[in-house]
Image (cartoon, grey):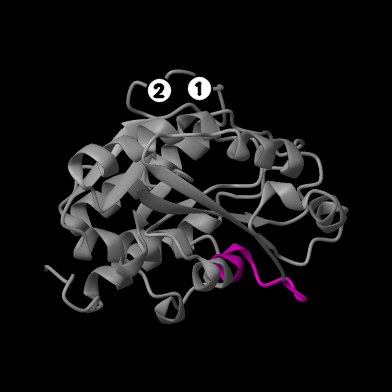
Amino acid sequence: MVSVTVLVPAYNEEQTIIKLLERVRAQSVDGVQIEVVVVDDASKDSTVSLLEGRPDLYDHLIKREQNGGKGAAVRDGLRKASGDYVLFQDADLEYDPADYARLFEPVLSLDADVVLGSRLVASPITRVHYFWHKVGNTFLTLLFNVMHNTTFTDIYTCYVLFRKDLIEADELGTSGWEQHAEILSRLARSARSIYEVPISYFGRTYEEGKKIRAVHAIAVARTIMLERLRPVSNGNRKLR
């Protein structure tokens, strides 16, 4: 039995948080035990009250007193996670928990260290979204692959599943959108085996609550380059 902590950072997601968690709880994969950790990053809407009314939908709820950004919420969630693996899950409905079986398959059959869900490899269903977001993601993915000698197709996917012992929460130095690049850079340098699997994508518009902006790509690119130069230590799991 493999244990997986599904980590759900949330900020002002009253429209989607309950439906999302219901979908997470509905997932059942043979050989996998799922723990759900939700971190509310000081939401100003009714997200917390909705969560408090449905304690059946999660195992742990962390309520941050001050908004610190997605990265701060991720760090708090990693400290609480007890699973062998951690899977990031956004609190909106852009990514479908029905894809968990695909994500878990390389772990169960190939003992994978890291699995990414790619929206660009034979995705079953993809909502047409912003052209410049795709251009930015393509550029960042290329930069990452050049810096790390990898063949990713979609580095800024939400779905990253990884062995928990590969990442130490207290060693992460970023709190913004660039933290994703920091984590993936460290995983790319310490994992023995990394896989991608196709996932569906239902991207939101800005009017529907999408938060990431083009300007965030600058910090992401900088983090990718800086992390490539930084020594990464994960005990006996450091390989290169």
Residue 73, label in figure: none
Disc 1 vs disc 2: Cβ atoms closer than 8 Å? yes
Residue 123, label in figure: 2
In this view, the residue farthest toward the top is 124
Per the model, the C-alpha gap separating discs 1 and 2 is 7 Å
Name the residue carrying label 1: 126
Out of 226 and 100, give the one closest to the viewer: 100
Q: Position of residue 82 (x, y in %)?
A: 47, 65
Q: Position of residue 171 (x, y in %)?
A: 40, 80
Q: Position of residue 201 (x, y in %)?
A: 52, 29
Identify whether 33 is placed above or below 77: above
Q: In which quadrant is the C terminus drawn?
A: bottom left
Disc 1 residue type (three-letter): Thr
The part of the chain drawn in magenta is 64-74
Disc 2 residue type (three-letter): Ser
Under circle 1, the secondary element is loop
Residue occupying image coordinates x 19% and y 41%: 110
Under circle 2, the secondary element is loop
Residue 226 visible at all: yes
Residue occupying image coordinates x 47% and y 63%: 178
